[in-house]
Amino acid sequence: MTEIAKIAIVDDEVHIRALLEQTLEDLDGEPEILTAANGAEGLALIERERPQLVFLDVMMPLMNGYEVCAAVRSNPDLAATTIVMLTAKGQEADRTRGLETGAHHFVTKPFDPDEILDLAREILQAS
Amino acid sequence: MIKASNYLKPAWVRRQFELAFPLLPPGTSAALWLSGKLLAEIGGAASGLAEDTPGAQAFHLVLEQERVGTLLLSSPATQALDWGKAFAHALQGILDAEHARRSVAQETLESYREMALLQRAVTELNHSLKPAAVAASLLKEFDGRKDTAGHGAVFLRNPDSASLELIQSFGEDAAKTFARLQGSRLFAEMATREAGDIINDLPASSQWAEEATDFKALLWLPLIAHGENLGLLVLASRHADGFAAGDLKRAQTLSSVAAAALRNAQLYAAEQDMFQSFVRVIATAIDAKSPYTAGHCRRVPEIALMIAEMAHQADSGPFADFVLDEDKRNTLQIAAMLHDCGKVVTPEWVVDKATKLDHIENRIHLIATRFEVLRRDAEIALYRALAEHADGDAARRIYQERLQQLDDDFAFIEKCNLGAEFTSDEQVARIQDVARTTWRDSRGEAFPLLTENEVYNLSVQRGTLNPEERKIIEDHAVHTINMLSQISFPRSLRNVTEYAAGHHERMDGRGYPRGLKRDQLSIPARIVAIADIFEALTAPDRPYRKPGTLNWAINIMHRMKLDNHIDGELFDLFISQGVYAAYAQKHLVAGQIDDVDVARYLG
């Protein structure tokens, strides 16, 4: 990672954004953390900033996570973006649909901070 | 160390500077430093305001009595200083609020961590009902984590002796190093404590420096469930500052779940033991009922499991899909042990009926006595004739002929009684002939030489059992079903009855008690049938014959295969995989083991 990594958090719940952001601050290399509070804003952010990694909530106003995911996947310029979907506990069935739309990983909320950090390190190292 | 540079976004600070600047006197420059990092600056070309620039006005920002940053201001006019003071005040307020928010978030993240750990632990630690597997799952949570121990071990208390035994461990030379630790006074101390603790920098401890030389730091926790101390978790490190309070907290979370899982595992093991001992009691009772079948219920499971293991290992052929998992193995073993349990209600004189006239006692002796009476009658007749001066030679000839006939008849009856050979219709007619002879008791009353019941039994054409007795024997299979279906087996053992009750069924549906066909019988049920037959044929002692040789037994079983009596595919597996030979090496005597021409029986 020569240049500073960018990570986007797209979630309509402010506490999830805050908690994820604070968790990701523990990563080495001080990645730039960007946030968006709904799907449409999130997609615009991703298209503009081209982050290596996006944490994407499923249930959001304006554009849900699947739609954002599908839009990102259909854009060849964003092929290097890895998408981690955030699903609510007990709705693991969403995974199938997420996989179909091109998400790479799934994390259930409430998330395990260590799992998030391990996953982010792994993805950023690979990119 | 508070990392305040994360508390404010540089872009936001820059915007504040840009908004304020038009209001400030020309020549003013400003910079904000947080945690040694320059967040934003404004004014002039590279104002270069460092935290220690002389002449600049510095407004310090503080969190928890620690200086975390500085707003620097350089201006020709004092008016700018007033703005700086106000802005620094506002920044301090924002930092205070952000610090409070982050503390709450940090607490939340810690709860998330613990919740995730608990969730995983509950699943991981409860996936097995084996104490060693639970211990292994617990240690897996510590093994390989960069921030904790290089060594770990779980000791479990032996319920009888109360001593701690090493069950699982990880780390370099774990078994040896933990054995050494177990011998130390320190370990004895750890074992008696009711709560866990950490000792860091062991070599510096005046009390324990000599005790645990393999490690420099230890963390231990008793495993307690329902107030019962089940064992001890020990983590050890070769670093003096090996453990922190957070490690102990994490270990406590995991240990509480592990202890509950261990208790469940121990209760389950105790239930299993009790059930197994009941099964053994029943099997022993059946075996003890008849000296001839001693060990049958012990050996049939052994053969059955050997066959099932071979079917499990087969990765092609008819048994490629057969899987012998742990539940199936237990079910088969119990079923094979109990397959004859119905025999506890079968009268032993039927089970052991060695001759046709057996009825608690072998009644051939009664008949022998009657023959003896007739022999003596003949002798009396001879002397009477001689006394009456009859023709002596003729009388002797008649006597000799009579004796000859009686001896022939008795020999014939004796042979029929053994049931070793098929009794033909002609022989049945002769039995009836012999029965027509009469003898007289002391009161002069005449009786047939053979009673009706004796004729009936002697006329059995195959074996020694009459139809009623055969029914009694066959009923044991019904009793087996009745008895086993009254036991409420756990789900994992729900097939015991099916596996056990089919051992007298035939593939062609002509067996008993239900006349089931091959496809109505599970593979394990068919395995028990073959194991039962093979054991019976090769058992060292049976009432009706000498111990059979391997060749003889397998030849009979081969005929049973051709007759569609036993499962041909299982028979082939039994022969081709050498199950018979492995069993013979272990249980048969030298005289029974002969060469088996495998090729002859296959295909």
Image: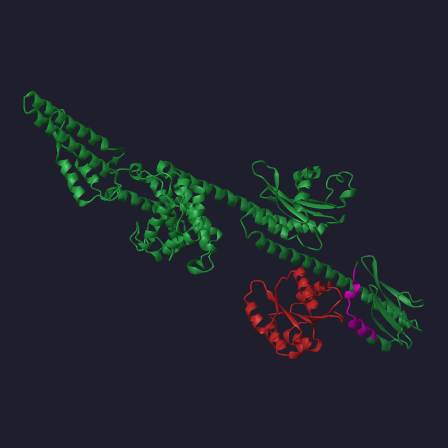
- Front position in the image: B551 or B207: B551
* Magenta stretch, residue numbers: B2-17
Q: Answer with left or right where residue A11 lies relative to residue B532.
A: right
Q: Is residue B180 above or below residue A16?
A: above
Visible in this render: residue B589? no
Observer able to see residue B456: yes
Residue A2, given in percent of the width and then of the height, sits at: 76, 70
Query: Of B263 and B345, which appears nearest the observer?
Result: B345
Residue B188: image x %, image y %? 67, 37
Prevailing SS of the magenta stretch: helix
Q: Residue at x 6, y 25 (%)?
A: B391
Chain letter for the part of the structure drawn in green: B
Q: In the shown orientation, is residue B137 left or right of residue B187? A: left
User: Residue B25, relative to residue A19: is it above or below?
Assistant: below
Q: Position of residue B550 (x, y in %)?
A: 38, 46
Q: Please state, as top left, top right, bottom left or bottom right, where the N terminus of chain A lies in the image.
A: bottom right
Indicate the quadrant where residue A77 lies.
bottom right
Chain A painted colour:
red
